[in-house]
Amino acid sequence: MAVLPMIGIFPVVRRRHTVERMNDIMLITGANKGIGHETARRLHQAGHTVVLGARNRELGRSAAAALGVEFVHLDVTDQDSVDAAVDQIGSEHGRLDVLINNAGITGTFAPLERGSIDDARQVLDTNLLGVMRVTNAFVPLLERSDNARIVNVSSGVGSLHDTVEHDYSDWHVVPPVYAVSKTALNMLTLKYSQALLTMRVNAADPGYTRTDLNAGAGAHDVTEGTDEIVRLATVPADGPTGTVSNRSGVLRW
């Protein structure tokens, strides 16, 4: 879908580009293709231990093997699957340094008043509750890290300001419930940043990126779309928290 540039929500903070240490243990959900796959490639190339999470076992294993990273079966809508992923990573690594909540779906392209509750439930269960389900389950492993970071992949269509300013009302371009889920995700990011004070919790907007999610359309390629995710995944312990940003900086609400 055509996801427009993200407008974020929190005060401007100084941007840092220093990676605090190498070989962090990093989990990326929904990473067998698109933004998640490219993020996995880049972080693995930078020297980190990357665990690629995917709900489809065959596609996930294939993608992980191609990249040379680890694989864990992880369906963000299934608590048993999430718990099993926690057990696997805990057993193999003993901690988690970075959680990147990337898994997401657009749902049906339909006017809000004609959309089905079942479709809305599926979108929210994946894009919002899935982030809560995974984050809450992995907090104990994140607490074992000396620099835990959580990155939630958001979208510009979740901006209240830009929805009004730029009239993001065309359901052919912006599925309404998808936009609602990203607005809620931005607030969830802020709430987690206040609850998990020893961790850096931020949201990244990839912008309108050429991926399967956008049917191959977009203003920039998948590498540019992962710039901010990679930066936030590697911020130091005194880096920003409670922000939404893209590759150009912290964004407005």
Image (cartoon, rainbow, N blue to C red):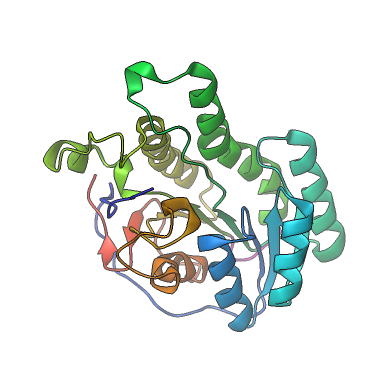
Q: Position of residue 4 (x, y in %)?
A: 28, 51
Q: Residue at x 24, y 59 (%)?
A: 12
Q: Residue furthest right?
A: 91
Q: Is residue 92 magenta?
A: no
As for residue 146 lying within the magenta part, the answer is: yes
Left or right: 252 in relation to 176: left
Query: Residue 52, relative to residue 176: is it above or below?
Result: below
Query: Predominant secondary structure in magenta?
Result: loop
Q: Which residues are magenta?
A: 144-148
Q: Nearer the viewer, residue 101 or 96?
A: 101
| Quadrant in which residue 58 is drawn | bottom right
Name the spot of residue 18 as percent of width and height, x first. 44, 80
Numbered label tally: 0
Work out whether residue 42 or residue 138 is closer to the camera in this orientation and state it. Answer: 42
The quarter of the picture where residue 206 lies is bottom left
**Nearer-the-camera pick, 178 or 11:** 178
Q: Nearer the viewer, residue 139 or 44?
A: 44
The residue under the point 37% across, 35% down is 175
Task: Tell me what residue is drawn at x 42 percent, y 60 percent.
Answer: 216
Q: Quadrant of the C terminus?
A: top left
Q: Position of residue 1 (x, y in %)?
A: 39, 48
Q: Position of residue 169 (x, y in %)?
A: 22, 33
Identity of the residue drawn at 21% across and 38% down: 163
Position of residue 31 in the picture relative to residue 124 (left or right) = right
Let me know if residue 70 appears in the view: yes
Compared with residue 52, is residue 81 higher up or lower down, i.e. above or below?
above
- Residue that sits furthest to the left in the current view: 165
Residue 95 in sight: no
